[in-house]
Amino acid sequence: MNGLNLGSTLHRLVLLIATSYITLTWDIWKYRCITIFQNKIIDVRTVADCFRKNITEIMNVGERSSDAHLIGSKIHQTIWIPPDLRNLKVNVDIKFTSPNERFGAGFICRDSKGLFTSAGTCTGSAGSSEQAECSGILSAIKWAKQQGVKRMEL
């Protein structure tokens, strides 16, 4: 194996590990929100099964086409539609409790194959969940610009 192949193999491995970590962290956040805001009790085994399924999908991402695909679980289903091949996709999620507390926002950037490229967070004050959502989206756009993203989809 020459240095170029080893470098590209290591790069792919790092991307897969980063994608797995970010995806699992995102899933934990989503299940936390379901528990708190929808008052649903989620069985840990169901969450673990979902994690295993998502990791399997991430590991096989290079073997699939870039068509839209479904990442789902018994708890709820999320449809993630990949961006155009020339674009990156930024997904944003907000945590807003009340105008008296700071909101938190997280954003993740992925390529057309669903591979993680970068992620970020922000906090701020807002009078409503809608205002927090808009502020979080604006922060994500500014963040993506700082990351050098030229073409993106939200």
Image: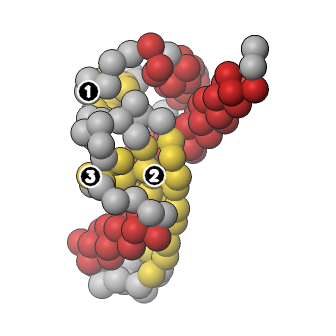
Residue 24 disc label = none
Residue behind mark 1: 68
Q: Nearer the viewer, residue 152 or 37?
A: 152
Q: Is residue 2 above or below residue 89?
A: above
**Residue identified by numbered label 3:** 153
Name the residue rendered at 44%, 57% in the picture: 107
Residue flagged by tag 2: what amino acid is it? Ile
Quote the CA–CA distance across marks 1 and 3. Answer: 14 Å
Q: Is residue 62 above or below residue 34?
A: above
| Residue 96 in view here | no
Neighbor class of circle 1 (other Cα within 10 Å; few <14, some 14-19, many 20+) is some
Specify the quadrant that holds the N terminus: top right
Quarter of image, res 138: bottom left
Q: Residue at x 37, y 26 (%)?
A: 71
Say left or right for 127 vs 108: left
| Residue 84, percent from left and from top | 25, 39
* Residue 103 in sight: yes
Q: Quadrant of residue 6?
A: top right
Residue at 30% over, 55% down: 151
Q: Amino acid at mark 3?
A: Glu
Q: Label 1, label 2: how many angstroms apart (C-alpha)?
A: 18 Å
Of the numbered discs 3 and 2, the one sitting upstream in the chain is 2
Residue 135 sits above or below residue 29 on the image: below
Q: Nearer the viewer, residue 8 or 118?
A: 8
**Where residue 139 appears, x then y in whole percent?**
39, 73
Q: Secondary structure at mark 1?
A: loop
Q: Going from the N terminus, do you reach mark 1 or mark 2 first?
A: 1
Mark 2 sits on what residue? 108
* Residue at x-position 46% and y-position 21%: 61
